[in-house]
Each structure stands twice: as C-alpha cells, then as structure tokens.
Image (cartoon, rainbow, N blue to C red):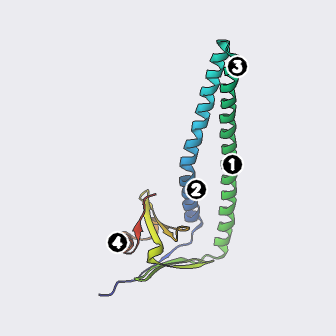
Amino acid sequence: MTEETLTYNTPCSAEIFTQIQQYEFKRLWKDNLKDNSKNIFYGILFTLVGILIILAEGYRFAGFFLGFSLAAFSYYFSYHSSYKKAKKRHEEIIEKEISCLRINSTDVIWEFTPTHFSFKNYKSEYKFIWQEITYCILDDKYLYITASSFMHFILDKANIDESNLNKTISYLETKSKFKEI
C-alpha cells in the first residue's frame, strides 16, 4: 500500500499572519516576563528590609540590602525596556510582512509526502526529510512544526477541515517526533 500525499493550500491572510505572529511572540516572552516580575518583588522586599534595618540603626547592613534592591529594580526596568523594544521591532516586522503579503497574495502550500515535508509561500520554498521534523499542538488552535531545530512553521487549524487535520496529525505521528513545548 502506498502512503497518500497530503497537500493543502491555505490562504495567505494578513489577519491570520498577525494572529499567529502575536501568539508566538507572547508564547516566547511569557516565561521571561514572569521571571522578571520576581525582580520587582525582590526589589521591594530588599527595600523594606533595608528600611527596617535603618530604623533599627544598623546603617552598615542597610546599605547592603538597599544596594540589592537597587540592583533588582535596575534589572527589572532594564529587562522591561528590552521587552518593549523587542515588541516594537516585532510589530514593525509584522507590518512590513503584511505589506508584502498584500502585494504577493499567493496561497501557502503545505505538502506531506512519504519522504518529506515541504512548505512554500510567496518568498520561499522549504523541503525537509522526516528525520528533521518535530511537531506539537499549541493551545488546540495551532499545529507547530519545527524543522532542523531552527525553522518553525505554524499551521492554523482553522484553515483546514477536521478530517484533513486528523490525517495530518496521524501522518506527523508516524513520520516525525512529537515534542512538547
């Protein structure tokens, strides 16, 4: 029995592209921002301890705790500033890509064959053997395919019907490796 080849044409939509890119940005920064919020907590804690030590007239140790609080606040605001710059740059990249999508509004072609996975959009075409592919399902909304550990392809489940989605997932189960993100 020969395995079937699955080919999908998904629309190249600015809305879908924006939604996927914003989701991916939030997913990547979520844990980092949560860890950074601990810095504000430690900054407040060390400030309070420093103030309590000053009230108890232990000025020498107060400087130690106030220095740590200053460092924690500094790190928090520095990281927050980096996040804002990255978010602004990411939005600029999305806007630039959307303008290109409007000019070149060809469909995205996804192909799952017995020997390889391929992806083609208006600006590039990729083909990977199955040993290079891992995949996972994100939030029951997206199918996240990683190739060669550095290329990421996100298939919005809303773009394909349930039957073809199940075929694609079973295809990925047999040909590639599941990876939890």
Q: Hey, which residue is sitting farthest left in the picture?
A: 1
Above or below 54: residue 134: below
Residue 12: give x, y in percent of width and height.
Answer: 56, 72
Between disc 4 and disc 2, whose residue precedes?
2
Residue 60's disc is: 3
The x and y percentages for residue 17 are 57, 65
* Image mark for residue 82: 1
Q: Is residue 64 left or right of residue 159?
A: right
The residue where tag 2 is placed is: 25
Give how far across and how far down residue 146 sits, in percent. Answer: 50, 68
Assign a secondary structure to mark 2. helix
Q: Earlier in the sequence, mark 2 or mark 3?
A: 2
Quickly name the residue at label 4.
170
**Circle 4 sits in a helix, a strand or a loop, which is it?**
helix
Contact check, label 2 and label 3, Cβ < 8 Å = no
**Three-letter amino acid code at the position of disc 3:** Arg
In space, the residues marked 1 and 4 are separated at their CA atoms by: 40 Å
Measuring from the top left, give residue 54's x and y in whole percent. Answer: 68, 16
- Residue drawn 67% across the image and 71% down it: 100
Give the CA distance from mark 4 to mark 2. Answer: 28 Å
Q: Nearer the viewer, residue 18 or 24?
A: 24
